[in-house]
Image: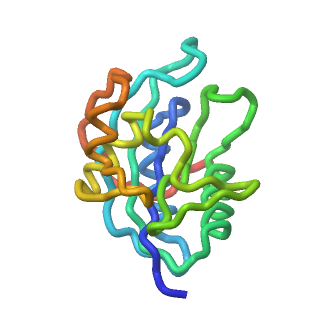
Amino acid sequence: MAAKDAFVGLGSNMAEPSAQLAGAVARLAALPKTELVAQSAFYSSKPVGPQDQPDFVNGAVWLRTELPPLELLDQLQAIEQAHGRERVQHWGPRTLDLDLLLYGNETIHSERLTVPHPELASRDFALQPLLDLDPARSLPDGRTLAALRQQCPDNNLRKLEPVARSPFPSG
């Protein structure tokens, strides 16, 4: 299989969120048949859904991978589990959330995976990191990330100071 460009959104609002994201980036860089092309800045944003939780830290990575989409999804979910992810409340607090936002120029609709991510156009905390990585990127339907970002609701997005990539978190 030829390598595909895959863009993964990262989010956390528990247990040192910036460290969770930095650890996830290290794990993503170590995936089989996958190369880390670039990492975005991290951003702080208000939570989507229940507001009685801490702000999120979000970012994105650009991977070049030979993994098929569902196999990549399995790897993302394994990394979430390694970071103690518990799926208790929809849009609730989490140690780590990894979303496959874009996979090549493909549109995927399956029981387990929808790409492009169905909420991408309404989430500045996903669009801005993607723009950091590839400002000219378009969705498979031709809409540009830049145009989507201009129309996107504001979620109090704030760029954070850089965090060095760390080894995998302990625990």
Q: Residue at x 73, y 36 (%)?
A: 87
Quadrant of the rendered structure where residue 37 is? bottom left
The one of 20 and 113 positioned closer to us in this rendering:
113
Coordinates of residue 51 in the picture (x, y in percent) = 54, 14
Q: Position of residue 168 (x, y in %)?
A: 51, 56
* Place of residue 135 in the rendered image (x, y in percent of width and height, measured from the top left): 23, 54
Q: Is residue 153 above or below residue 75?
A: above
150 relative to 76 in the view: left or right: left
Question: Which residue reaches farthest bottom?
Answer: 1
Quarter of the image with the N terminus is bottom right
108 left or right, relative to 112? left
Classify 23 as above or below 13: below
Classify 156 as above or below 87.
above
Q: How many marks?
A: 0
Q: Position of residue 157 (x, y in %)?
A: 32, 27
Front-lying residue, 103 or 80: 103
Left or right of 122 on screen, residue 33? right
Residue located at (63% from left, 26% from top): 92
Above or below — where is 44 with respect to 138? above
At x 50%, y 20%, the residue is: 54
Residue at the spot 73% in from the left edge and 55% down from the top edge: 112
